[in-house]
Amino acid sequence: MWIADCSRDNLLITSAVNVFELARGWDSRRATDAGMLLLREFIILPLDTRSALEASLIDTELRRRGTPLDAGDLLIAGVARANGLAVITRNVRHFARIERLEVVAPTVT
């Protein structure tokens, strides 16, 4: 699993926004328990004022270019960019449009 490979050499960091997006898909107690167990491996960054302002700058940049993103992706990008972190995602197409944001596609085997 790529998360296990990644965690050997790096801290696992996610945002409260990602937690929301994950948790809204948990449709059973078993899924919730498994998700909570996984989240214990991560440092979870809050959506703070600096991150929210960064997300609004990204939103302005993208809307000016006619390539808007949904609020969830904007907030995730804002947290990442405000903290100098990369976004690891399979949805590279959405995040690659954001300037000054490193985007990494996970290697799934």
Image: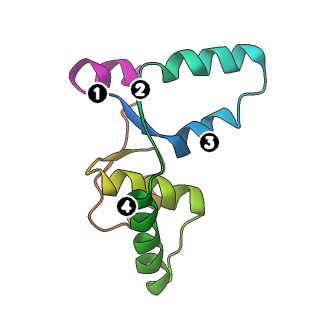
Q: Earlier in the sequence, mark 2 or mark 4?
A: 2
Which stretch did the figure color magenta?
Answer: 1-11
- Whole-angstrom CA distance, mark 1 to mark 3, is 20 Å
Pointer 3 local density, CA inside 10 Å: few below 14, some 14–19, many at least 20: few
Callout 2 touching callout 4 (CB < 8 Å): no
Secondary structure at badge 3 equals helix
Question: Residue 106 placed where, x, y %?
Answer: 37, 36
Q: Closer to us: mark 3 or mark 4?
A: 3
Q: Compared with residue 28, is residue 66 higher up or lower down, i.e. above or below?
A: below
Q: Can you tell which mark lies on residue 96?
A: 4
Question: Residue 24 placed where, x, y %?
Answer: 70, 37
Which amino acid is tagged 1? Leu
Q: Main secondary structure of the magenta part?
A: helix
Which residue lies under the disc numbered 2? 42
- Whole-angstrom CA distance, mark 1 to mark 2, is 7 Å
Which amino acid is tagged 4? Ala
- Whole-angstrom CA distance, mark 4 to mark 1, is 22 Å
Q: Earlier in the sequence, mark 2 or mark 3?
A: 3
Which amino acid is tagged 2? Phe
- Whole-angstrom CA distance, mark 2 to mark 4, is 24 Å
- Does residue 1 appear to the left or right of 31 in the view shown? left
Specify the quadrant that holds the C terminus: top left
Which residue lies under the disc numbered 3? 21
Q: Can you tell which mark lies on residue 11?
A: 1
Which amino acid is tagged 3? Glu
> Residue placed at 71% from the left, 28% from the top?
26
Q: Can you tell which mark lies on residue 104?
A: none
Q: Compared with residue 41, is residue 57 higher up or lower down, i.e. above or below?
A: below
